[in-house]
Image: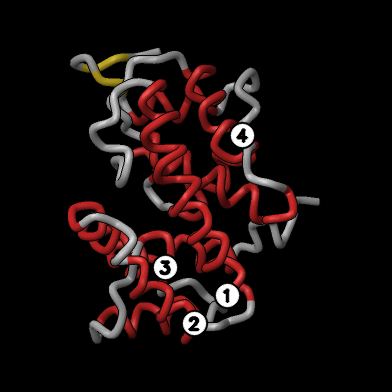
Amino acid sequence: MRLIGGFMSAVSLVEGLDDPVCGLAPLLDAARLVQPGLESVRPLTLAGVTTLAEAGTIWRDQLYLTALAPFLLDQLARARHGKLREMAAADAQFSEVLDETLAESSIAAGRKLVGLAAAMRGDRLLPKLADRAARHEIPCHYLTVFAARCAAFSIDDRTALGASVIREVCGWSIISPAPAVAGFIRSCIDVIPASRFGLRAA
């Protein structure tokens, strides 16, 4: 595992997760599909978390499982049915769930991603999201756009959740072997009840 200046590089971590030993290749493929330039992104909500123990107790249990994952699953269900109005309303409400710093980072990343996503051929929802964001009718949180892209690519719920966690850990300031990080990623999605998933993997 290549380390740079005490930090794990995004590229080395992504390549490590692609190892068959980690068993996350399908999730990694989905993350790359939904987030172009995955190797160059930085954490949105994991910033400042520097150990796997902190990630498990502070981020996973107190933020991801309580706010991020439910929001993603709900927006994904809405996106699959083209419910733009409901997505927009939920997107606005999500700003109240996150603290100000996280909300600003989420919106900035969402607006950047929707600009890339709007050009997807054959998809009707993403251009509408981009238009609303451009007119400042919605905040355009990252997970809203992420959900819309997952729906456009027909990605199932569990894979979408795993891809969202992988997107967070890319560029993570933590020195830990890829298999250990892979175990953490699985712990984020394995604790979610199967009944919570709408579209399942085949």
Q: Secondary structure at mark 1?
A: helix
Who comes first in sequence, dot 3 or dot 4? 4
Who comes first in sequence, dot 4 or dot 2? 4
Q: Which mark is residue 86?
A: 2
Question: Residue 141: x, y in percent?
Answer: 34, 65
Separation of residues labelled 4 and 2 (CA atoms): 32 Å
Separation of residues labelled 3 and 4 (CA atoms): 23 Å
Residue bearing mark 3? 117
Q: Three-letter amino acid code at disc 4?
A: Ala
Q: Three-letter amino acid code at disc 2?
A: Glu
Q: Label 4 crowding class (10 Å Cα cut-off): few <14, some 14-19, many 20+? A: some
Residue sitting at x 63%, y 38%: 191
Tell us which disc is closer to us: 3 or 2: 2
Q: Secondary structure at mark 2?
A: helix
Who comes first in sequence, dot 4 or dot 1? 4
Q: Which mark is residue 78?
A: 1
Q: Label 1 crowding class (10 Å Cα cut-off): few <14, some 14-19, many 20+? A: many
Residue 13 quadrant: top left
Tell us which disc is closer to us: 4 or 1: 1
Residue bearing mark 4? 25
Is 26 left or right of 90, judged from the image as shown? right
Q: Three-letter amino acid code at disc 1?
A: Arg
Q: Three-letter amino acid code at disc 3?
A: Ala
Q: Contact, CB < 8 Å: mark 1 with mark 3? A: no
